[in-house]
Image: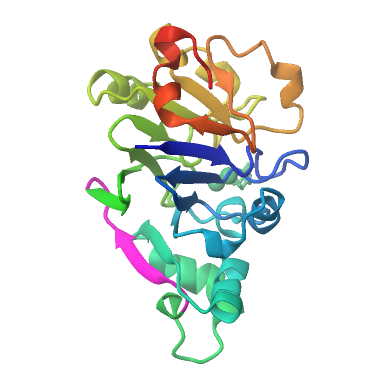
Amino acid sequence: MDMKVQMLGTGSAFAKAFHNNNALFTVDGRRLLVDCGITAPKALHELGYSFNDLDAVLITHIHGDHIGGLEEFAFQMKFIYGRKPTLYIADTLAEPLWENSLKGGLQQNPSDTLSDYFVLRPIAEGIVHELLPGLQVELIATNHIPNKANYSLLFNGFFFYSGDIVFDGELLESLVSKRGVQLIFHDCQLHPPGVVHACLSQLLTLPAHIQERLYLMHYGDDQPEFIGRTGLMRFIEQQKTYELARLTFAGQSGMIE
Ligand SMILES: O=c1ccn([C@@H]2O[C@@H]3COP(=O)(O)O[C@H]3[C@H]2O)c(=O)[nH]1
Ligand SMILES: [Zn+2]
Ligand SMILES: [Zn+2]
């Protein structure tokens, strides 16, 4: 199986040198977008893709850098391409996504709802769902903003992709030691304090066997100043394609991509 990930962007919500932290998964030629932020339409365009090249989108939580491009996605698919893409979203987030974020722009008739634009696939936490042939996900509820639902993603049982989350060393240890996670993509705020995100100084306290599996994303514009200052962890670069099978063994063989 050919499984790749390419970040449309690796920036924090306020970054200007990097696009929003959204990921494009390609599995045997099918494409899933993980989060569709404000910069996603332009970031896709820069890579030579249109929205019509996507099979589905999966949303981690409701912040602009993760959902701000959905209105354009929905309108383009309806009025230019004439088809509904699949929207995977936690069952707890579907209504707030429509009522609190998308309805104002997308509702044209009083009866319009998310299902008029997307094939809506609400997914429950803790249950494995197949998103594309060969790509499964389990949603894991994680902490980001108090009282605000947020989900991280466990792909194919071995790859943990953080939604925006605060530092949780116990969760990471348990994922690696009990659940067999081999690869972690983690949001990283470069400067403390890590109030709603994990910050680099916290991630640097992780033991070597976790750091060597962990790649940093969702960082600020001064990221170049931190190259070489991340312990055994590495930065993911936006727009670069990573073969997941090779990344999985990075910790053991030293291969990066
Ligand atoms: O209680 C809060 C809520 C939000 N924020 C900022 O707004 C940003 C929203 O997107 P984000 O989740 O990628 O990052 C968040 C932070 O940068 C914050 O600092 N404290
Ligand atoms: Zn974010
Ligand atoms: Zn967020």
* Left or right position of 66 against 250: right
Q: Where is residue 118? Give x, y as percent.
A: 44, 72
Q: Position of residue 75 (x, y in %)?
A: 59, 75
Q: Please tell me in which quadrant of the rendered image residue 173 appears.
A: top left
Quarter of the view holding residue 49: bottom right
- Compare residues 230 and 143 and report the one nearer the observer: 230
Q: Is residue 88 magenta?
A: no
Quarter holding the N terminus is: top left
Q: Image point 65% across, 32% down: which residue?
A: 219
Q: Which residues are magenta?
A: 117-127
Q: From the viewer's perspective, is residue 64 above or below residue 79?
A: above
The answer to whether residue 93 of the structure is visible from this angle is no
Q: Nearest the camera: 209 or 55?
A: 55
The residue depicted at 42 percent of the width and 40 percent of the height is: 143
220 is higher (above) or lower (below) than 84: above
Query: Residue 122 magenta-drawn?
Result: yes
Q: Give the x, y percent position of residue 71.
A: 59, 69
Residue pictured at 34% horizontal, 38% vertical: 155
Residue 113 is left or right of residue 157, and the answer is: right
Residue 69 image position (x, y, % from top left): 61, 61
Residue 28 shows in the view: yes
> What's the image's color scheme?
rainbow
Image position of 17 with respect to 117: above or below: above
Point 71% across, 44% down: residue: 14
